[in-house]
Image (cartoon, rainbow, N blue to C red):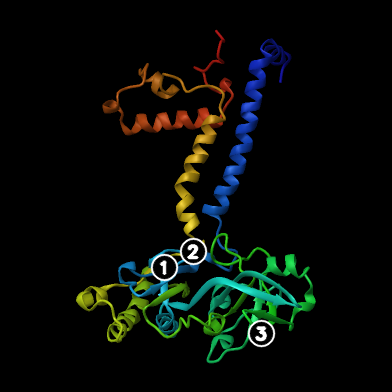
Amino acid sequence: MSDSTFRSLAKAPFLSLVVILSVGLGIGANTAIFSLLHQILLDSLPVQRPQELVVLTSPEEFKGGSSRTGDSGGMDHIFSYPMFRELERHAQGVTGVAAFFQFGANISFQKQTLPNGVMVVSGGYFPILGVRPLLGRTIEPADDTGSGNAVAVLSHGYWSDHLGGDSGVLNQPLKVNGQTFTIVGVAPKGFTSTTLGQEPAAFLPLTFKPLLTPHWNGTDRWDDYYLYLFARLQPGVTRPQASAALNSAYAGLLEEQSKKPRFFYQKKVQRFLASRLSLKDGSQGQSIMRDDTKIPLIILMCATGCCSSPWPMPRTCCWPVRRSGAGRWPSARRWGPARVTSCCSCWWKRCYWPWPAVWPDSRLPGSP
C-alpha cells in the first residue's frame, strides 16, 4: 500500500476500523460457513469410487404396519428384512445390495459398560463400500449367513476414545446388550458410516438383530420396515439400467408380499403391484440432515457474504447496466434475462470484491 493510502486511512480512523473489522469478520464467517457447507453438501463418502453407489427407495404410501426411521432417511428409504434378503439374492445390475440399522445399546468391554450406538450391517456392507480396516478385518458375507459369526468391528472413534487406541483389542470379547462378540477389526479413521453425523461404536452382523433386541424380532414380517439399503452399480451399467434390472425382480417380490396373511392393501393391490424401486445417487450416503439444511446453508452463505461488504448496494444497477442507459432500478416488467444476469454479477462482485477501487462508479461513503 502506498503512503497516500495510509494517510487516507489515518484521516478517518473510525471508518477505517469499521472497514477492516467488517471485512475480517466477513472473511472469517464465510470461511466457517463454507467449511460446514462443504462437509454437509459437497463431501463424498470416504470409500472406493463413491460415484458408483446408489440408495434404494420405494413409495412410502405402501409402508403400512410397523416402521422405524432414523437419521438416514424417511419412510421411502426403509425396507423390511424379508424384502432385503430377497433383493440381496436377486441383485441384478448391481454388484450387491447392503443393509444397515442403528440403535442404542449397552456396550461392555473389560468390565466397563457404557450406553452407545451400534449398527447391525449385512455381510455385503463393507465389501460393497470397499472400506478397508485399520486393524484386523471387516464383517464379511460369511459372518451374516445362517446363524452367522458373532464378530464385531469397532469404529475408529470408539477405539481411540474409549480403548486408548490399543491394537491388542483384536480377538477380545465385547458384550452388546448381554450378547458376546469377538472383536475382529477396527474401522479406518475418517469412516464413521454412510449417514452424516452418525458414528456407531461397533458394527455387528445383521443376522444377530433378534438377539440384540429380544422384544422385537424384526426378521419375520414383510410389513416391518426399518432397514436402509444401498448398492453399487456394476461396471458399465447406468443407474436407469440397474433400476430396470432390480425392478424386474422387485415386481415378483411385491406379488409374493401381496399374498401374505397380514397384507394391508387389498383394496389398492393393483397400485401396490405397480409400485417400483427408485435408485438415487448414493455418493454422499443417506442423511436427513443434508436434505433439511441444504437451502438454509446456501442462504446463510449468501447473506454472510453480502454482509461482509461495508459498502451498501447502490441505488443504480451495476456498471454494465448503467452504461447501457439504465440510471435507476428498472421496474420488474422491464427486467430481461440479460439485465438480471448483469445485476447478479454486480451483487456477487459487491459482496466478494469489497474494495471499491475495482469499480469505476464506486466511492467510499463521504468521498467526493
Check disc 2 and report the residue beneath it: 286
Residue at horizontal 57 percent and vertical 73 percent from the top: 119
Helix, strand, or loop for circle 3? Answer: strand
Amino acid on which disc 2 is placed: Gln
Residue, disc 3: 180
| Residue 198 against residue 351 in the figure, above or below | below
Name the residue at 41% across, 68% down.
Answer: 77
Does residue 238 appear anywhere in the picture?
no
> Residue beneath label 1, please?
77
Q: Residue at x 30, y 31 (%)?
A: 336
- Mark with earlier residue (3, 2): 3
Q: Earlier in the sequence, mark 3 or mark 1?
A: 1
Asked if the residues shown at circle 1 and circle 2 are in contact, with their CB atoms under 8 angstroms apart, the answer is yes
Name the residue type under label 3: Thr
40 or 108, nearer to the observer: 108
> CA gap, disc 3 to disc 2?
30 Å
